[in-house]
Amino acid sequence: MKLVYFAWVRERIGRREEEIALPASVATAGDLLAWLKARGPEYEHALAEPRAIRIAVDHVHAKAETPIGSAREVALFPPMTGG
């Protein structure tokens, strides 16, 4: 699965994207956030406030309970504002 990071999420993690094989225990977008937070201090810092992270699964906004098993891409980004 391809993970893509935007804005300050990308800055804190230190990479734009990565290809990753998820463990079977990661079934939902919320599970993914929890699993990523445990990968290291940069992930923990970026994902410290899960409510401040927006998730898109294959380019569709998703909630924590959204299944990600067959997804090709998951994007993580902060809330966007209009202007």
Image (cartoon, grey):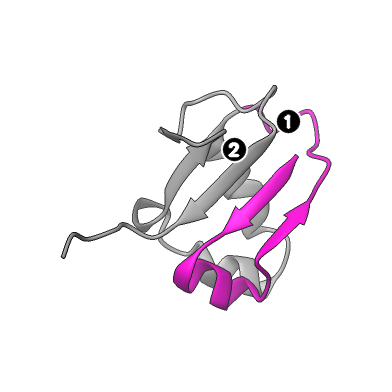
Asked if the stretch drawn in magenta spans residue 6, the answer is: yes
Up the image or down, 25 lies above or below 44; here it is above
Q: Which mark is residue 25?
A: 1
Q: Answer yes or no: do the residues labelled 1 and 2 have beta carbons within 8 Å? A: yes
Residue 75 shown left or right of residue 82 in the figure: right
Amino acid at circle 2: Asp
Image point (22%, 61%), residue name: 81
Q: Residues within 10 Å of mark 2 (few under 14, many from 20)?
A: some
Q: Secondary structure at mark 2?
A: helix
Q: Position of residue 9 (x, y in %)?
A: 51, 67
Quarter of the image that includes the N terminus: top right
Q: Amino acid at mark 1?
A: Ser
Q: Which residues are magenta?
A: 1-27
Hey, which quadrant is residue 78 in on the image? bottom left
Marker disc for residue 31: 2
Report whether 54 appears left or right of 22: left
- Figure quadrant of the C terminus: bottom left
Return the disc, 1 or 2, that comes first in the chain's sequence: 1
